[in-house]
Amino acid sequence: LSPRPGETVFDLCAAPGGKSMLAAQMMEDQGSLLSMDVHPHKSDLIAKNARTYGITCLDTVPSDASVYREALAGRADAIVCDVPCSGMGVIRKKPDVRYKDGDHIKVLPPLQLSILENAGKYLKPGGRLVYSTCTVLKEENEAVVEAFLKDHPDFALEPFDLPGIGRGEEGMLTLWP
């Protein structure tokens, strides 16, 4: 995401708040950081953590990222969408994931795409958008991004580096334990 001081940054699925705290730090607490989460108690926790760390550029809003908010249109320089997912990439740390009914996965890609669609509307021209999950399933990752790009030819994948981790040559990267 590479947030910079003075930018407007949105974290659309912010709980538990680690991405927002890191973004605020990278922004040197200068600019505007909006952290949204669908659960009000999690938004409150993010706000409490921001106060604890002395972060003043962060505002929290309990809001469903899959529901479009006209007031946010075209405002963000950078947006991170770490969307709700099946969790299949963290099954080692959360073994109960394997016992979920497989049907729950079917509802996730449309939800993920709706969040990504809204993010695309919130982004300023030339802005940066990061889509991430903690799953390894193509239907929640590549397929969602490809569906978004198909309907939004003004967006493009960009190569990126994650220092010490890897390079997303094609604009996408799956990390394995």
Image: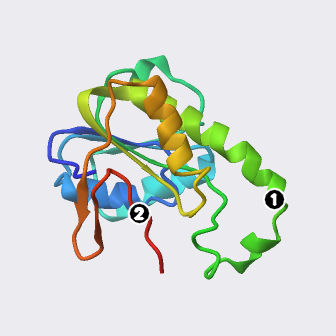
Horizontal relation, residue 155 to residue 95: left or right? left
Q: Is residue 175 above or below residue 145?
A: below
Q: Secondary structure at mark 2?
A: helix
Q: Secondary structure at mark 1?
A: helix
Horizontal relation, residue 67 to residue 31: left or right? right
The quadrant holding residue 161 is bottom left
Pick the residue in front: 140 or 100.
140
Q: Is residue 152 above or below residue 169?
A: above
Q: Can residue 63 be seen in this snapshot? A: no
1 or 2: mark nearer the eye: 1
Q: Is residue 77 above or below residue 33?
A: above
Of the residues shown, which amino acid type is indicated by label 2?
Gly
Label ID, residue 102: 1
What percent of the width, then of the height, locates residue 83? Answer: 54, 49
The colour scheme is rainbow
Give the distance between the C-alpha atoms of the residues marked 1 and 2, in whole angstroms.
29 Å
Residue highlighted by disc 2: 18
Question: Badge 1, how many Cα within 10 Å: few under 14, some, many 20+?
Answer: few
Horizontal relation, residue 17 to residue 28: left or right? right
Q: Is residue 107 above or below residue 85?
A: above
Q: Earlier in the sequence, mark 1 or mark 2?
A: 2
